[in-house]
Amino acid sequence: MIIIGADYHPGFQQIAFVDTDTGEFQERQLQHREEAEKFYRELAAQGQKVRVGMEASGHARWFERLLAELNFELWIGDAAEIQTKRVRKAKTDREDARLLLRLLLEDRFPRIWVPSWENRDLRQLLWHRHRMVQARTRIMNQLQAVARNEGLRSKKRLWREPGREQLQSFRLAPWASRRRQDLLELLDRLNPTIAELSQAIEQEVHNCPAAQRLMTHPGVGALTALAFVLIIGQAERFQCGKQIASYLGLVPLEDSSGNRRRLGHITKQGNSLLRFLLVEAAQVTARSLPEWRSKYVHLTMRRGRKIAKVAMARKLAVRLYWMMRKEWNYEQMKKFGSHAGQPGNRYGVK
């Protein structure tokens, strides 16, 4: 078996590999994509069994597809944990490749969970819609600025037919008029695209029972439910709700020593799209459920609106995690969830 440690870069990869049968060790630098593809296809033609270890990278999709096509094992490692295992101060591409190879040989490689290709493709649907909505928001803000400069303050009424007719009726300078016309045309092109993508998300949720269960929670729509299922993947990977909050970057940075404890801003280490959706959904939940609203108002008065939003998003993430892991809907979660402190349940539900 050939074991390869690959220090991957967008333009090339530095590899260190060893043949476990003969003990032969070699190092090479492979340029992308032709030279690298030729090297791995030659190994496949020789009938070699190959295992490749590399750090998590956002630019290696083609490389992962190539190894899957050749039936090679690909282990992707946690880059932060690999960094802690580096002993030498000298950091070069060759040293990184040797480190990855050594971790593979010593069975200390910090392998992480990798979603399936179908999962990744559905994530592209969510990201595409999110970016389209962001683009539409920027266009709408620019048109609102044009309207305000002309003395029109209609807010949401600007997007209704009378408001739009009033916006188009203003006499503007030539380039200002051109800008207004182009922005309106872009807005008309984005609206059908976003509607089509939203319909596709609804269809995917219809085929996903786990997302349908999450949607029973007040404030959680199809987009948030599907994003949670896709990004969390297997709920059994996590032991408790604290790990979910940490995975999504909803816990504060901590720099404590001795008797001094110092907490900073949230880590933001997880998926930024899911974190954004949870914050938005938690605000809707706070408007829907009286107990959530009272908690949100209390936190706002004590710590401020921003911290309160994040705290409610963390609470919602933990709830959705247990609903997903236990395969509960909202009513089951309320029935079998925590009853601590409630009259008649001093020792919990029996």
Image (cartoon, grey):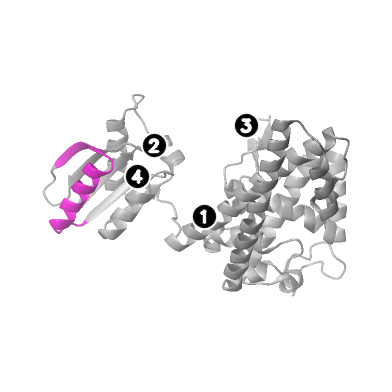
* Amino acid bearing label 1: Gln
The residue pinned by badge 3 equals 255
Provide the residue designation for mark 1.
124
Q: Position of residue 236 (x, y in %)?
A: 53, 63
- Pointers 1 and 3 in contact (CB under 8 A)? no
Extreme top residue here? Answer: 90
Q: Which residue is mark 2?
A: 85
User: Mark 2 and 4 residues: CB-CB less than 8 Å, in contact?
Assistant: no
Q: Quadrant of residue 135?
A: top right
Marks 1 and 4, Cα distance to the nearest angstrom?
23 Å
Q: Secondary structure at mark 4?
A: strand
The circle on residue 230 is none
Mark 2–mark 3 Cα distance, whole angstroms, equals 21 Å
Q: Earlier in the sequence, mark 1 or mark 2?
A: 2
Residue 330 image offset from top left, x and y in percent:
73, 70
Instruction: Pick whichever, 23 or 328, lies toward us.
Output: 328
Alpha carbons under labels 1 and 3: distance apart? 36 Å
Q: How many marks?
A: 4
